[in-house]
């Protein structure tokens, strides 16, 4: 039984030998992480710019309303 397992392991290693492990890591690990990172950073950037524009609009509206209605 032990020699069969060793032979099976050896055959598995030989079948994977020409396939570069760096390519496997790049395809299965790094590329999905890069895609998710890009999506998240672009989403955060869009959301941040939207919030900043809303803040500018709110401040200008508040300034206008203060000048119009709160004259002291």
Image: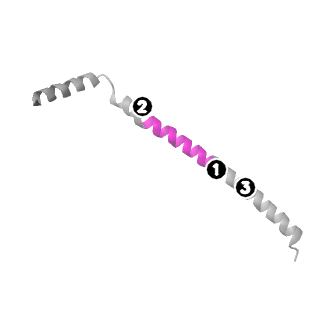
User: Which of the 4 quarters of the picture holds residue 54?
Assistant: bottom right
* Magenta stretch encompasses residue 26: no
Find residue 10 and name its label: none
Task: Name the residue that disc number 3 marks.
Answer: 54
* Inter-mark Cα distance, 1 to 3: 11 Å
Q: Which residues fall within the magenta stretch?
A: 30-45
Find residue 27 and name its label: 2
Mark sitting earlier along the chain (1/3): 1
Q: Is residue 13 left or right of residue 32?
A: left
Q: Within 10 Å of the Cα at label 2, are there few (<14), some (14-19), or many (20+) other Cα atoms?
A: few
Mark sitting earlier along the chain (2/3): 2
Q: Quadrant of the N terminus?
A: top left
Viewer-proximal residue among 1 and 47: 1
Query: What number of labels is visible?
Result: 3
* Inter-mark Cα distance, 2 to 1: 30 Å
Name which residue lies at 80% across and 60% down.
60
User: Which of the 4 quarters of the picture holds residue 14?
Assistant: top left
Task: Tell me residue 30's x, y (percent).
Answer: 43, 37
Find residue 47 and name its label: 1
Name which residue lies at 56% across and 41% down.
39
């Amino acid at each position: 039984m032990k020699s069969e397992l060793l032979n099976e392991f050896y055959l598995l290693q030989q079948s994977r030998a020409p396939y570069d492990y760096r390519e496997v890591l790049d395809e299965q690990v790094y590329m999905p992480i890069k895609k998710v990172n890009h999506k998240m950073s672009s989403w955060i950037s869009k959301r941040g710019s939207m919030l900043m524009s809303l803040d500018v609009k709110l401040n200008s509206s508040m300034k206008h309303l203060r000048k119009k209605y709160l004259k002291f």
